[in-house]
Image: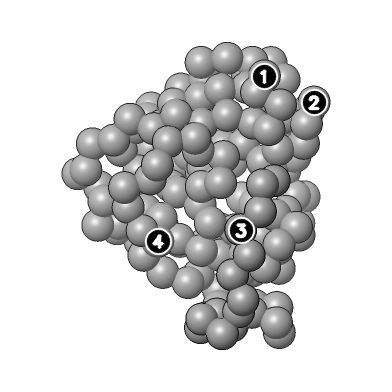
């Protein structure tokens, strides 16, 4: 996920809860220090979407509270640090440590609590899919029950 700039949220204490889609894995995150959208080709593949929205924090601020044994990790061999982490039962993206173990990367969509902060930047924007546009205000808004 590239370099990790100093985030403006470093000092803000939060206690956030997250889980996977099937509910067998649960975790807690304290004090995210950085929040971004990444548009790189790896994040697009890993997320199956146009971008990955991720929080970064220190490893000691990530704690598994349920189902850690169900986690599956895959380290991309050609990358120095890129990896995926997901629930082996439902496939939902879950937090992971960087390969060096110095940061924890948390997929923002895996959180259940409302996140009181906003993304700080568009990372690797030049690598974005050609259909990505920043201004989506022209799109119709449909709200359905999922
Ligand atoms: Zn699951
Ligand atoms: Zn990326």
Seen from the viewer's position, the closer of residues 105 and 117 is 117
The residue at which mark 3 appears reads as 143
The residue at which mark 2 appears reads as 89
Query: Label 3's element?
Result: loop
Q: Position of residue 115 (x, y in %)?
A: 38, 45
- CA distance separating discs 3 and 4: 23 Å
- Residue placed at 21% from the left, 43% from the top? 12
Relative to 130, is 117 above or below? above
The residue at which mark 4 appears reads as 119
Q: Does any portion of residue 42 appear in the rendered image?
A: no
Q: Position of residue 83 (x, y in %)?
A: 67, 46
Q: Is mark 2 within 8 Å of ligand 1?
A: yes
- CA distance separating discs 1 and 3: 28 Å
The residue at which mark 1 appears reads as 24
- Mark 1 and mark 3 lie on one chain; the one further toward the N terminus is 1
Number of residues whose C-alpha sits closer than 10 Å to that of mark 3, classed few (under 14), some (14–19) or many (20 or more): few
- Mark 2 and mark 4 lie on one chain; the one further toward the N terminus is 2
Q: Cβ–Cβ below 8 Å for labels 1 and 2?
A: yes
**12 left or right of 55?**
left
Relative to 68, is 112 above or below? below
């Amino acid at each position: 996920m590239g370099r990790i700039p100093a985030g403006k949220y470093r000092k803000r204490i939060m206690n956030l809860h997250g889980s996977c889609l099937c509910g067998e894995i649960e975790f807690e995150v304290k004090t995210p220090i950085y929040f971004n959208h990444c548009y790189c080709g790896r994040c697009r593949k890993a997320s199956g979407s146009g971008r990955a929205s991720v929080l970064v924090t220190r490893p000691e601020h990530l704690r598994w509270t349920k189902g850690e044994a169900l986690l599956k990790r895959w380290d991309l061999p050609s990358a120095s640090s890129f990896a995926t982490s997901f629930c082996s039962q439902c496939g939902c993206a879950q937090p992971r440590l960087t390969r060096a173990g110095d940061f924890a990367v948390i997929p923002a969509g895996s959180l259940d609590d409302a996140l009181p902060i906003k993304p700080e930047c568009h990372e690797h924007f030049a690598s974005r899919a050609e259909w990505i546009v920043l201004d989506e205000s022209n799109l119709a808004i449909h709200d359905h029950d999922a």
